Image (tube, helix red, strand yellow):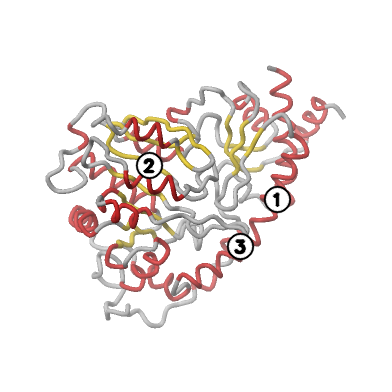
Amino acid sequence: MKDAARYEDFKQKGLCLDMSRGKPSTLQLDLSGPMLAPLTNFLAEDGVDVRNYGDPLGIPEARRLMGQLLDMPPEQVIVGGNSSINLLFDALARAVLHGPLPGDVPWGCRKGTKILCPVPGYDWHFGMCDMLGLTVVPIPTHPQGPDMELIETLVRDPLVKGMLCVPMYGNPSGVTYSEEVVDRLACMRPAAKDFRIFWDHAYCVHHLYPDRRDTLKNLYQACLHAGCPDRVLMFTSTSKITYAGGGISAIAASPANIRHQAERMRFQRVCYDKVNQLRHVRFLPHRAAVEAHMEKHAAILRPKFDLALDMLEKELSGIATWSKPLGGYFICFKGPQGCAGRTVELCRQAGVTLTHAGSVFPGNHDPEDAFLRLAPSYPPMEELEPAMELFTLAVRLAMAER
C-alpha cells in the first residue's frame, strides 16, 4: 500500500493517542502505590509532627534524601512541593526582583537581561524567561554538551546573567554534559559577577539501561574548587520517580544561596506538604532504594524506547536523524528541513498528538522547521506501535509534499 493510501487508512481508524509530553504511564505510577499506605506515626526524626507547622525547609530525612540525589549536603537543601519547575521559576523570579544575593542589583532593573539556553531545549525554560522579561539566547548542543566556546564568548557581556539547562539526559537532546563541559562552566569568568546557572537535574536517576548509564560531574563541587561556589542553583524532584502530580522537589546550592532563598521564601509559604515528604522517605529512605525503584521504571520504559528507535531505523534511515538516549524521557528527532510543522499536522489529523513544531526553540521558532520531540513513555505498547508507524508515515508524506 502506498504512503498516501496507508495514511487515509490511519485516518479511518479513529486513533486518539498522546505523545505530546514526557508523562509516566499508568504502570509506572502504579509502582508507587505502597507509598499511599496510611501513616500511623506522623513524627519526623526531629520530633516535629508533620501534620502541623514547622520545618519550613523540609523535614530532615527528606532534605537528606534529596541531598543524596543531588550529591549535596542536606543542610544545603530546601525541600519543596511536587514541582521543581516551581522552585526554579521562583528562584529565577527572585533574581529578577531582588538579585541573586543581598547587595546584587535586581536583574529586572536592567533592560535586555539575557539568559543562555541550550537548543534544542526545554519549552518551559523558554516560557518562564519570556514571562519574566528575560531574553533567551539559544546555544547549540553538541554530543558533549552546549557549545562552550560560544558560551565563554557570550558571558563577556555583562547583560548575560545566567543559564538554564537540563545537564543529564537533556530535554529533549538526551545529551549528558561531559566532565570538560562541567569544568569549563565552573572555571569561566563571566562579566556579570552575579551570573547563575540553573541546573535542572530532572533526570538524575532516570537511566533506561542500568548496565549502560551516563554519569554527570557535580557542578557545585567544580564551582567550589574554582572559587565560585555561589554560581550554581541545583534542582530536582520525584515527579517521574513517584507521582508526577504528587511528588516532592528540592533546590540545593551554596550556604549563601540557600540562606538567601530561605529568607525570600519566608512570607511565600509557611511550610510545604510535610505529610507527603514523610510518605516519600518512608517509601524511599535513601538513594539505594530510589535506584532499585528506578530499575522498575526502566523495565517499563526500555521496551518503549527500543520499539520507537527500531521503527525510526526501519522506516526513516537515511531520511532523518535522531538521538539514542541512555536515559530520560525523550527522543530528539531531526527530519527533513521544512517538514516538522506539516508532520505534526498530519499526525494530528490522524489522531496522534505530538508536541507542536518549534517548541524546542525559543519563541516556538525552529529556523529549520526540522526538530521534533518524541515522548514514547505514556502510551501502552499496543498503542505506541501504531503511533510510531503513523509518525514515520507522516514524515515521509511531509517530505514528499515539500
Q: Which tag is nearer the camera, tag 3 or tag 1?
A: 3
Q: Please name the residue shown 34% across and 30% down the image.
A: 153
Quadrant containing the C terminus in the rendered view = top right
Dot 1 amino acid type:
Asp
Q: Is residue 147 visible?
A: yes
Mark 1, Cα crowd under 10 Å, few <14 / some 14-19 / many 20+, is: few
**Label 1 to label 2: alpha-carbon separation:** 30 Å
Mark 2, Cα crowd under 10 Å, few <14 / some 14-19 / many 20+, is: many
Q: Position of residue 57 (x, y in %)?
A: 26, 64
Q: Position of residue 73 (x, y in %)?
A: 32, 66
Q: Which residue is mark 1?
A: 306
Q: Which residue is mark 3?
A: 210
Q: Is residue 125 left or right of residue 393?
A: left
How many numbered discs?
3
Of callouts 3 and 1, the N-terminal one: 3
Which label was assigned to residue 164?
2
Dot 3 amino acid type:
Pro
Image quadrant assignment for residue 43: bottom left
Q: Position of residue 122 (x, y in %)?
A: 46, 40
